[in-house]
Amino acid sequence: MALTDTIRYNELPSLEEANTRRQAQHINNLIECPLREVFMKYGAHNTYTLYLQHRHHQVHENEAIVKVEGTAHLMNDDEIEDIKSVGNKVIPSTWMGVNMLPMELSVVPSSVDTPIISPDFIAEFTSILTSNVCEGLFGIDTLVEHDWIELTIGNASVVVPSKGKDREEDYIPVAFAFDYKKPGFRVHGKCVKGHRHTPRPVKK
C-alpha cells in the first residue's frame, strides 16, 4: 500500500519553505475565515485538522510514510504487509491538497474503519485552496486526542504530547484545529525547527 503519487509527494516543500509561505497575512486570514467555515459546515473539525504540507523523506514507488503509535517511519511494501499480517490495518491519516491523495498512513487495529471524508467537504475545501492559489500549501490531517510536537530521532519522526508551555520560536506550526466555542484556530501540532528532511530528489 504505497503512496498513490510519490512524484507529487517528493515535490512537496520542505518544512522551512512551507512555513515561509504561510507567514503571509492573507494566509492566516484564509485559515481563520473560509477554511475554518468549511470545516465547521461539514463537521470535519471533529475529526480532522488543516495541515501545512511538507516533505519528510524521499519516497520511492514501493514505499510510504507510516505512523506507528505516533512515530512515522519510511516503510516499503513488504514491511507494511508484515504489519498487516499480525492483525493490523494500514489506513490513510494525512492527505495532500487539491487531489486529496494519501500523504501519510497510520497503523490501527483491524477493527478500525478506513476513513471516508465527505465528498462535499472535499469539493468545497479544494475549491477554496484553488481560488486562493494554495493547492500545494495545505492538506488534511487526522485530529488526535492531544496537541503534539514532532521531532527527529534517528531516521524517524517522533510525535510527543505538547504541554502547552513550549517556546514559540523553537517550533513551526503545522496542524490547525477549529472549535465552535473559540474563534480563529488552535495550533494542534508543530514541528521542531531544524526537524530534518531528506533533500528533494534532483529532476533528470
Image (cartoon, helix red, strand yellow):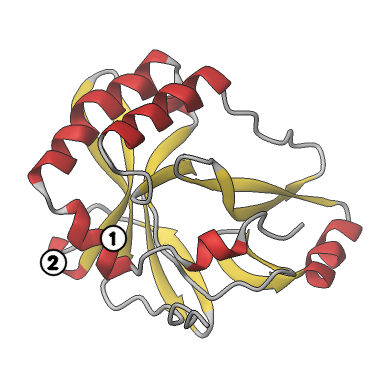
- The quadrant holding residue 14 is bottom left
Q: Residues within 10 Å of mark 2 (few under 14, many from 20)?
A: few
Residue at the spot 52% in from the left edge and 62% down from the top edge: 9
Q: Position of residue 21 (x, y in %)?
A: 20, 57
Camera-side mark, 1 or 2: 1
Is residue 26 rendered to the left or right of residue 107?
A: left
Amino acid under disc 2? Glu
Q: Quadrant of the N terminus?
A: bottom right
Residue 86, located in which quarter of the rendered image?
bottom right
Dot 2 corresponds to which residue? 169
Q: Position of residue 68 (x, y in %)?
A: 64, 61
Residue 4 image point, x, y percent? 67, 54
Q: Is residue 165 visible?
A: no
Q: On screen, 139 above or below 169?
A: above
Q: Is residue 128 visible?
A: yes
Residue 18, numbered label: 1
